[in-house]
Amino acid sequence: MSDGETKCAVVAVIGAPNAGKSTLVNALVGAKVSIVTQKVQTTRARVRGIAVEGDAQLVFIDTPGIFAPRRRLDRAMVAAAWGGIDGADITLLMVDAPLYLAGETERGQAGKTRADTDRIIEQLKTAEQKAVLILNKIDAIARPQLLGLAEALNETGVFTDTFMISAKNGDGLQDLKAFLLEKAPASPWLYPEDQLSDISDRLMAAEVTREKLFLRLHQELPYDLTVETDDWKETKKGVRIEQTIYVARDGQKGIVLGKGGETLKKIGSDARQELMSYLDIPVHLFLHVKVRQGWAEEAARLREMGLDVVE
């Protein structure tokens, strides 16, 4: 950091589930601060990722996807997403462009994505909240369709600027980051120069294990599981981590364990390897699986995830 005046912007990233928000934040920060899977609603709590460029600091708030909530967990996640806007200097609304367009004629996930996105735009409009439109996955859509979508969404009057990107392969990210740096107001930094995220090591460890579960079992397992770090002990030989995987039904426990416990061993091995790289010390990871029906309605489980309880 130079001796000149510092700049800092808090950037909230919102959107429907699976729009690519975590992939974008990880790419702009230049490090993994949020887990990413093909499972919708992977991100459950607000995660702050921090990027520094010269005298400027950008604090990205990666939020859960905004959708129509049913369970207590859902309500807490949606509240966390909208709460991410409070105090933000810039709000980015991320849209999965090809999926949104497909939702005009298709039901299923495409239809839900379009409905959720339209609902978010309407709520921003009602609140007179301006945002920057981010059209994602432009590599999977024809240019005329993309331009037509940008024009249609800008007619809502919500958006001040529009960027067309591919968060996964990096297209358009340099221009987006330059725009955010330019818009950052003069302000002291909110975090030390070497800090990449505000997530604790305990919570990140649980998130890494949850990511490996979804990546390996995404077709077999529904959304009804969570991971908690029960114990964390640092020793001369590294760190010993005890975690519990909570599932909602007995049949799900069998899926996680696998034949002879082999699936759980592979998940533990995958998580341990990533945690050793993340923490830069030897990791001894011990996983347990418990059935806990209705965990998504329990206040204690939600607080462990870093969520506020919403009745």
Image: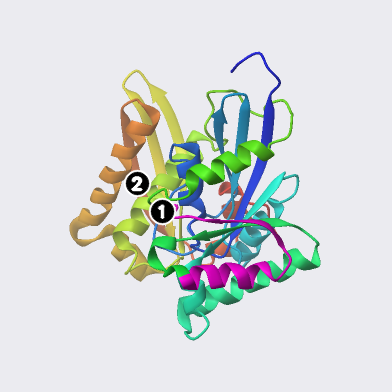
Estimate the spatial distance between the alpha carbons at disc 2 and disc 1, rounded to whole Å. Answer: 7 Å
Give me the residue at 71% from left, 51% from top. Answer: 85
Task: Provide the residue designation for mark 2.
Answer: 287
SS at badge 2:
strand
Q: Where, by quadrant of the figure, is residue 239 drawn?
A: top left
Q: Where 64 falls versus 106 (above or below)?
A: above
Q: Is residue 121 left or right of residue 49?
A: right
Label 2 Cα crowd, 10 Å radius (few <14 / some 14-19 / many 20+)? some
Give the magenta range. Answer: 144-168
Label 1 Cα crowd, 10 Å radius (few <14 / some 14-19 / many 20+)? many
SS at badge 1:
strand
In the rendered structure, which amino acid carries the disc numbered 1? Ile
Q: Position of residue 279 (x, y in %)?
A: 39, 29
Give me the residue at 38% from left, 48% from top. Answer: 209
Q: Where is residue 83 in the image (x, y as percent from the top left)?
A: 71, 53
* Residue sticking out furthest to the front: 144
Give me the residue at 59% from left, 53% from top. Answer: 63
- 156 or 81: which is nearer to us? 156
In the rendered structure, which amino acid carries the disc numbered 2? Leu
